[in-house]
Image: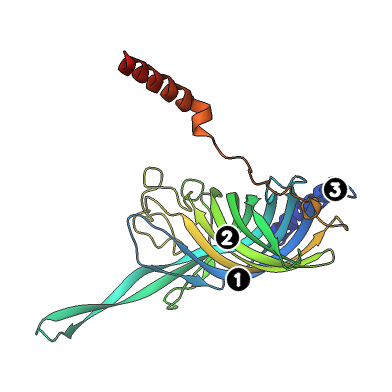
């Protein structure tokens, strides 16, 4: 774990230095600390019995750059997050049969769950549209991001204590260290001078698999208790839902430039469209009526 913490600290310091060097006195930048908790799970194919893993912690650092032109609403940025991901997998079950009102027997299953936690370094590339209310004291935003990830380490346990817990050993033929996915969320921030204090919620939707498919790794015949899958899943992406507190610092003391842009009011059109003048309908009608009158006199 010391090695993982060193990696996180070094990357975080690098992000801080980059954000600091890129700022000017009037720069539209913010640097934000985030931290929270949530739930995690996996989407297996073929489908398996799973349940949400609660208490998935996350913390990180966010950098945002806001356009100086109001027509480009919102911000772009990058995040660096440490996130606990994982899943609870029903690896076995016991059955009992109960009587139904129709006189038949119905199977009732009690599942035994295997839990795996994955410590992941997340790198979302973020677009964040927003708008201000309450005289620019409250910012409401949504987020959309492309996410890249690297799995640092993993631990497993059997929740029924049938087998001892342990460190998950990564195997190149079986496990994927790198991953990617999408993320979306929403939140708000209260602005107090140069400080932003807020709350946001987001959903991380994984596209890559935590385990390589059966074409590369078929079964657990050569594994220990760390791998409960008799046959490796074809798909195994990880998902997270997290709620986070945010505390940010705005580098521009004056405020964001978009606050001070006065948009021109639309002027109402006073003139109306004259169909007759544009199409020459009156002149043509007069000519045709004059011709008919002349013909009548003759």
- Name of the residue lying farthest toward the front: 297
Left or right: where does residue 58 sit relative to residue 48? right
Q: Is residue 159 above or below residue 25?
A: below
Identify the image quadrant of the C terminus.
Answer: top left
Sooner in the amino-acid sequence: mark 3 or mark 1: 3
Residue 185: which disc? 2
Mark-to-mark CA distance, 3 and 1? 31 Å
Which dot, 3 or 1, sits closer to the camera? 3
Left or right: where does residue 30 sit relative to residue 292? right
Reading the image, the residue beneath label 1 is 37
Question: Closest to the observer: 51 or 217?
Answer: 51
Q: Position of residue 284 (x, y in %)?
A: 44, 22
Q: Is residue 270 above or below residue 99?
A: above
Do residues under tags 3 and 1 come within 8 Å of each other at their CB atoms? no
Question: Closest to the observer: 2 or 251?
Answer: 251
Residue depicted at 33% across the width and 16% down the height: 297
Do residues under tags 3 and 2 come within 8 Å of each other at their CB atoms? no
Residue 23: which disc? 3
Identify the image quadrant of the N terminus.
Answer: bottom right
Q: Position of residue 167 (x, y in %)?
A: 55, 64
Q: Secondary structure at mark 3?
A: loop
Q: Position of residue 252 (x, y in %)?
A: 86, 55
Sooner in the amino-acid sequence: mark 2 or mark 1: 1
The image's colour scheme reads rainbow
Sooner in the amino-acid sequence: mark 3 or mark 2: 3
Which dot, 2 or 1, sits closer to the camera? 2
């Amino acid at each position: 774990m010391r090695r993982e913490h060193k990696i996180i600290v070094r990357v975080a310091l690098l992000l801080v230095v980059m954000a600091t060097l890129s700022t000017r006195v009037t720069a539209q930048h913010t640097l934000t600390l985030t931290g929270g908790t949530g739930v995690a799970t996996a989407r297996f194919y073929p489908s398996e019995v799973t349940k949400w893993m609660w208490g998935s912690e996350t913390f990180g650092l966010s950098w945002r750059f806001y356009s100086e032109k109001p027509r480009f609403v919102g911000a772009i940025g990058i995040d660096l997050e440490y996130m606990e991901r994982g899943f609870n997998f029903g690896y076995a079950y016991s059955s009992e049969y109960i009587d139904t009102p129709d006189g038949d027997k119905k199977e009732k299953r009690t599942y035994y769950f295997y839990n795996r936690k994955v410590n992941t370094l997340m790198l979302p590339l973020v677009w964040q549209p927003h708008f201000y209310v309450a005289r620019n004291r409250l910012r409401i935003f949504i987020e959309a991001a492309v996410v890249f990830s690297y799995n640092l380490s993993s631990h497993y346990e059997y929740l029924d204590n049938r087998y001892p817990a342990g460190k998950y050993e990564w195997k190149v033929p079986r496990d994927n260290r790198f991953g990617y996915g999408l993320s979306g969320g929403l939140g708000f921030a209260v602005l107090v001078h140069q400080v932003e204090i807020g709350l946001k919620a987001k959903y991380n939707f994984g596209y890559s698999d935590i385990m390589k498919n059966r074409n590369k790794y078929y079964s657990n015949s050569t594994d220990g208790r760390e791998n409960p899958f008799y046959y490796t899943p074809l798909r195994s992406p990880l998902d997270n839902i997290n709620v986070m507190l945010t505390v940010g610092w705005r580098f521009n003391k004056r405020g964001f430039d978009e606050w001070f842009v006065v948009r021109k009011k639309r002027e109402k059109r006073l003139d109306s469209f004259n169909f007759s003048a544009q199409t020459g309908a009156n002149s043509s009608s007069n000519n045709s009526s004059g011709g008919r009158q002349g013909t009548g006199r003759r």
